[in-house]
Amino acid sequence: MRLSPEALEAVMQLHERFLAHKPGGRRALLSYNDLSTLDLAACDLSDADLTAVRLRGAKLAAATLRGAQLSLADLRHAELDGADMTRADLRGGCFRGAAMNHSLLVRADLREATVVLHDPRQAQIVRSFRDSGEATAVSGDAPPLPQGTSISLRADFADAAMRGSSLEGADARRANFTGSILEGANFAQAKLGGAIFHSAVLTGANLRGADLEGADVSDAILDPEALELAELKKAITSRYAARSEEDLAAALKQHALWLDSQGQKGTRALLAKLDLSDRQLAGARLVMALMPGTRLRRANLDHALLAMADLTSADLRQALLNEADLRGATLRRACFNAANLAGAKLGPLLDVGTHHTDFPANCERARFVGASFAGANLRRANLVGADFSRADLTGAQLQEARLDDCTFTGAILTDANLDGARLLRVKGLPQKR
């Protein structure tokens, strides 16, 4: 149900009186209402009933939601920077792609919610969240679920920006933080058993006193000293294998043979979960190499051939990739913060195979904070949700690129070409380029 602006204003005024303990005040009861895209910035909805409310894309920056009931709420892509959700009930809520920097979730309830279907509204919520990959039930193509079916929904913060947020003492058992940016977040004394932090950025995060038993932090970006914490001993972490220079050279030689013989000889390079930080790989021939989750921090990959390579969730912070060929590569959720990609080729690989297929580079949800793309080619690239904060995109070619949900705060876009690019819900893009 969509409230009229007048009806919502009346509810808010009565709630304000309720919070002030004035006569005639009434608690805001907005459960199951559709408040998507509304501007509620700095509003006070403390203790409001917002169960299963739809706030998708709503503006709630600096809002006060202390003790609010937000279980099963849909806050995908909402703006919640600086919001206070202390002790709020967020069980089973969906915050995918939300901006939650410096928000307060102190002692909030972020556990999963169990929904027993008994009316169409609940079925609609489950169907919507299932489309986002969260429901533990069968896929969206399955037949309708009968009444009485029990569905578990995790609280979902996948790909949310939560820099500097405080989750001190929060109960986030089994919550999903996949791909979330949690730099400097405070998890002191939080319950995080079974939570998922796959590919999340946790540099500078405070994990002391947190219960991480069974939490999945594989491929997460962590400070080296954090890996020594007792709190992480019972978590699921990535194990990175080491390769000698000789072994790596042999693998590259076999890969070249595999490429030249079209798979008839040699062996495709399988370099997943290796620690190749600081390696000298300039000009390396790594076309179609499999390198998901590989550490390549500060590696020299200048002029490297990485077309169609799989670098999903790889760590390439401060790497050198000048003039590197990344056409058609898979870079989903990879971290290129402070990397140099000047002149790099991230456009599509054209006319491949007997079907003459084009393969655009897939950089969905990749992080390029402070990276250099001066003169780089990113035509037609899938950059949905990528973070270009403080990046240098001088003269970059971004024609027809998919830039929905991207962040460009502080980026340099002098002479960048965005003709034909998709720009839905983009943050920080200057009006004049």
Image (cartoon, helix red, strand yellow):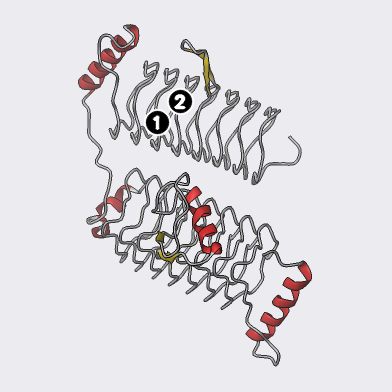
Check disc 1 and give the amino acid type: Leu
Q: Is residue 210 left or right of residue 202?
A: left
Which residue is drawn at the image coordinates 50% and 19% (left, top)? Answer: 323
Q: Nearer the viewer, residue 198 or 300?
A: 198
Identify the residue position indicated by label 1 in the image: 311
Q: Is residue 267 visible?
A: yes
Compared with 16, 133 (above or below) is above
Question: Where residue 61 sits in the image (x, y, percent)?
Answer: 63, 62
Query: Dots 1 and 2: beta carbons under 8 Å?
Result: yes
In this view, 139 is above or below 23: above
Q: Secondary structure at mark 1?
A: loop
State whether residue 101 appears in this view: no
The answer to which quarter of the image holds residue 22 is bottom right
Which numbered disc covers residue 111? Answer: none
Identify which residue is drawn at 47% across, 74% down. 87
Location of mark 2 (residue): 329
Q: Nearer the viewer, residue 27 or 391?
A: 27
